[in-house]
Amino acid sequence: MEIQKTVVQKQKKSLFLFFFTMGIVLVAFNLRPAITSVGPLVGVIQADLGLAHWSAGLLMSVPLITFAIMSPIVPKIANRLTNEKTLLLGLCVLLIGVCIRSVSMSFFLFFGTVFIGMGISIGNVLLPVVIKDKFPQKFGLMTSIYSTSMGLVASLASGLSVPLASGLNLGWQGALIVWGIPAVLAILIWVYLIRLDQGKGNPIKSVSLSATKIWRSPLAWQIALFMGFQSFLFYVTITWLPEILISHGISRGTAGWLLSFTQIIGLPSSFFIPVLAARLNSQVWVAFALGLCSVVGYAGLWFGSSFPILIISITLIGIALGGNFPLALSYIGIRTRSAKRSAELSGMAQSTGYLLAAVGPIFIGYLFDMAQDWTTPLFALILISALVMIFGVSSGRARHVE
C-alpha cells in the first residue's frame, strides 16, 4: 500500500514537472516575437505613421526601457503572488499590449509597446529563477530548452512579418496582432498549472535592493554589462539589419527572411552554449569565441557588399547573438549559489543591462540620420562587439557573486 502511494506521488510529480516544462517553453515563446516581428516592418510603419529613423528606433527601445524599470520590481511582485501567478499576470499584460499596439495611431503604437515590455520583463526575470528553483540539477539543459524555444519563435516572427502583412493583406497591424496567439496558449496552461499546484508556488523571498550588496559586486556589474551590451547588439540587429541589407540592394521580403535566418542559424549555439557552460568551471573561451564571431560578422557587413560575404557575416552574427544571450542567462545561475541570490542578480543585471540596451536602436538610428549611410553605425557595432567580448570573458572566470 505504501509502495503504491509512493508510485502515485512520483507519477503526479512527473506529470507536474512535464506540464511545468511545457509552461516554461510557452512563456519562452512569448518573450521575443512581439519585438522581433517589428524589425522587418519598420519601414512600412514609418511610412504609414510618418516616423523618423530615431523615433522608429525608439519603438524598439521602449520595451527595453520598460525592462530596466520593471526588472527590480518583479521579485517583489513574485514575493506577494508566487512565481506562477506573477508569470500569468505578465502574460495577460503582454496580450493586452499586443492588442493595443495594433491600433493604427502613434499613441497606441507606443502605449501598447509599454505594456508589451512590462509583460515580457516579468518572464525575463522569473524564468531563470524558476528554472534554478524547480530544476537545480538540470539548470543548463532547461536554460538551453528555454533559450532555444525563444529563439525559434523569434526567428519565425521576423520571417513571417512581411508575408503576413503583404502576402495575406493583413497590414502591419494584423501581422503584429498575430503574435498574441502564443500568449493565449501560455495563459491557458499557466491557469491549469496554478490550479494543479493549488496555489503552492514557491515565492521569491523579499528582495530589498538597498539592503543587499548585489549592487556593489564587481562580478554582478560585469554580468550586467555583458547582458546589456549583448542585448544592445541583439535589438539593434532586430531593428536595423533589414534596412542595412536593403541598402545593399536586397528586397524587403528577402531582408526579412535573412533576419529570420540570422536568428535560426543561432539556434544550435543557443541550445548547446548553456549545456557547455554548465559543465565548465570557466566560460572564458566560450565568451571569447562568441565575441570574435560578433566582431568579424559586423565587420563583414561594413566592408562587404557581395551576397556571399553578407551571408557569411549574418551567419557569424547569428551564432554570436544566439549564444551570448543564453550565456548571460547561464551566468545568472552559475555565478550564484541560491535561487534568492539568483533573483537578486537577475533583477539587477536585467535592469541595468536593458537600460543600456535601450540606447541601442535609438543611437544607431540617430547615427544613420546624421550620416545618411550605414558606415558609421556599423563601426559603432564593431566597437560594441569588442565590449561584449571583454565583459563576457571577465564574467566567465570561475567565481561566485557573494
Image (cartoon, rainbow, N blue to C red):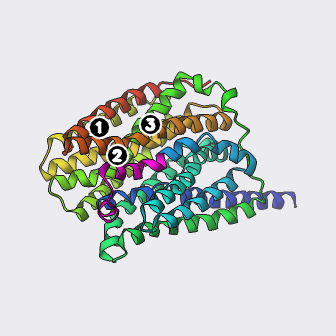
User: Residue 60: x and y, percent?
Assistant: 41, 51
Give the total of numbered labels.
Answer: 3
Identified by mark 1, the residue type is Leu
Magenta stretch mostly in which secondary structure? helix
Mark 1 / mark 2, whichever is N-terminal: 2
Neighbour class for label 3 at 10 Å: few (<14), some, many (≥20)?
Answer: many
In the foreground, 23 or 210: 210
Q: Earlier in the sequence, mark 1 or mark 3?
A: 3
Quadrant containing the N terminus is bottom right
Residue under numbered circle 2 = 236
Q: What numbered label is drawn on residue 381?
A: 1
| Residue at image point 34% right, 56% down | 39
Q: In this rendering, would 172 be left or right of 304?
A: right
Residue 306 - label? none
Per the image, label 1 sits on a secondary structure element best described as: helix
Task: State the CA–CA distance, disc 2 to disc 3.
Answer: 12 Å
Q: Where does residue 5 sit, x and y in percent of width and height?
A: 83, 60
Say if the magenta span includes residue 45.
Answer: yes
What segment carries the magenta color? 44-64
